[in-house]
Image (cartoon, helix red, strand yellow):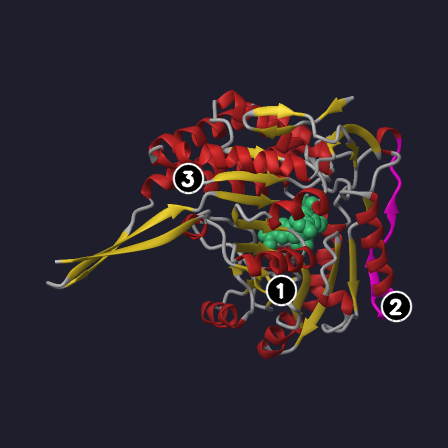
Amino acid sequence: MLHLQNYINGKLVAPASGQYLPNINPATGEVYSQIPDSGEQDVLEAIKSAEEAFLAWSNLSAEKRGRYLMRISELIDQNLDRLAEAETTDNGKPLWLAKTVDIPRASSNMHFFGTGIQHFASESHFMEGVAVNYTVRKPLGVVACISPWNLPLYLFTWKIAPAIAAGNCVVAKPSEITPYTAYLLSELCIEAGLPAGVLNIVHGTGPNVGAPLCEHPSVKAISFTGGTQTGKTIARTAAPLFKKLSLELGGKNATVIFADCDFEKTVATAVQSAFSNQGQICLCGSRILIERPLYDQFKSAFLERVKTLTVGDPMLADTKQGALVSEAHLQKVLQYIELAKEEGGVLLTGGQRVQLEGRCANGFFLQPTVFENLPHSCRTNTEEIFGPVVTLIPFDTEEDAISYANATEYGLSASVWTNDLTRAHRVSHQLHAGMVWVNTWLLRDLRTPFGGMKQSGVGREGGWEALRFFTEAQNVCVKL
Ligand code: NAD
């Protein structure tokens, strides 16, 4: 059986403990590989190698660093099929999704920051006749990148790329639930000739690897994407050590639909936004707010489409919904379905585990599920479920729509559907969400700030924001 390895100091190595954890394919329920069950000793080795690599890497020109990233991007492209199959095997997502979204985006992340760093200029402020200030942005040193299981290689590279482009050396930890493409990335980094220690990847659990990594005084910044509870733990660790912190956490996003929307486009995108990746995208719109005059028409068109979302083997081309990531996560989502019923929700479709035949007979599949008749303030409508479960909620006025949309502790994203341009702006500005899409969803420009308000996180990723996060400003004032 395949044994994944850590990537430390440019080499693939076994964990110091010699222990491994089983890695399960969510579509079959079978253990198909073993993951290093690393611990503090591996983390210390990785930090040491990153520290040793830092001086040379940070002194390399931005152009030369960028070339390594672009080489890695090319290798990701060349290995598209292999990486997509690995992602699907690890995560349960449809193969076509991994091939068209996850892996191409991982390549773009590398390419985007590999080129972007070459345009990252310093600012200067001239004090007429008195002095000139210039601000240099220096890499921090060793930084930690910790990522979740839902978009494994996509989010892993979204952090690593700006960190190394800016001249830092990284110790990265992918989710122990989906480590496979991170392992393959380490092979590609070796093939690309990335200098030893610039990127180190340590596999294992949050408590055994993530915690000692965050606690180590040599780690100057932590870029974390994951759950809000884990984010709180990391924030508690980081605060007294004065580490820079970027936290991309959970969401409970609203899709706000006005009666004057472009109906067909709205229904199609609302379905996509609700159920893409089995609802396991932090940006998924799981609360669908619909202006009352459109409610019945929307409901029937929405349900008709949801019923066409074939749940099946993620390797098959006509599968729309693959497996949930794990049995434990499936059980969590099923508990939320029970809660929705207890809270008075009317189940419109779905709600059941799906039993497939053949290869996928023991997989973690769930029907796409839609509820109505739940108050906007109930737990189902305010807590993150992170699965294929959505609610339809009617509203009467624009003010109601805004207040329902904002009635959660989360503030990651929202989408607004209307052909009234003024209203689109007015509503967007009143939503407590770090990202608002108007008449679209998940249309990404990597230059824009990405992140959430309230319990959805702290800081922003993307574009200059990411490069600023991974650098420290130093102002030099020269008297004339
Ligand atoms: P998680 O918080 O359980 O784990 C995320 C990562 O943190 C994993 O690598 C895990 O091993 C590690 N970790 C766990 N405990 C740790 C600790 N004490 N110290 C350091 N690291 C630790 O999250 P998950 O279940 O993997 O991912 C799902 C969550 O991620 C959802 O809440 C989702 O909304 C969120 N998410 C947010 C975004 C965003 O951009 N805002 C994107 C994707 C996912």
Q: Is residue 420 above or below residue 7?
A: below
Q: Do we see residue 275 in this rendering?
A: no
Q: In the displayed structure, does residue 342 sit left or right of residue 278?
A: right
User: Are the residues flagged by discs 2 and 3 in contact, CB closer than 8 Å?
Assistant: no
**Residue at mark 1:** 455
**Residue at mark 2:** 342
Q: Which residue is at a point 49% across and 70% down the rendered structure image? A: 429
Q: Earlier in the sequence, mark 1 or mark 2?
A: 2
Q: Residues within 10 Å of mark 2 (few under 14, many from 20)?
A: few
Give the residue type that dot 3 points to: Gly
Helix, strand or loop under label 2: helix
Give the residue type that dot 2 points to: Glu
The span picked out in magenta is 340-357
Q: Which residue is at a point 48% across and 33% down the rendered structure image? A: 52
Quarter of the image for residue 155 reads top right
Viewer-nearest of discs 2 and 3: 3
Q: Return the mark for residue 167.
A: 3
Residue 390 part of the magenta-drawn span: no
Gap between marks 2 and 3, in whole Å? 53 Å
Q: Quadrant of the N terminus?
A: top right
User: Are the residues flagged by discs 1 and 3 in contact, CB closer than 8 Å?
Assistant: no
The percent coordinates of residue 50 (x first, y second) are 51, 35
Residue 344 part of the magenta-drawn span: yes
Helix, strand or loop under label 3: loop
Q: Which residue is at a point 47% across and 49% down the rendered structure image? A: 462
Q: Do we see residue 117 in this rendering?
A: yes
The percent coordinates of residue 255 (x first, y second) are 62, 62
Q: Earlier in the sequence, mark 1 or mark 3?
A: 3
Q: Quadrant of the C terminus?
A: bottom left
Q: Is residue 221 above or below residue 168?
A: below
Q: Residues within 10 Å of mark 3 (few under 14, many from 20)?
A: many
The answer to which of 305 and 159 lies nearer the viewer is 159
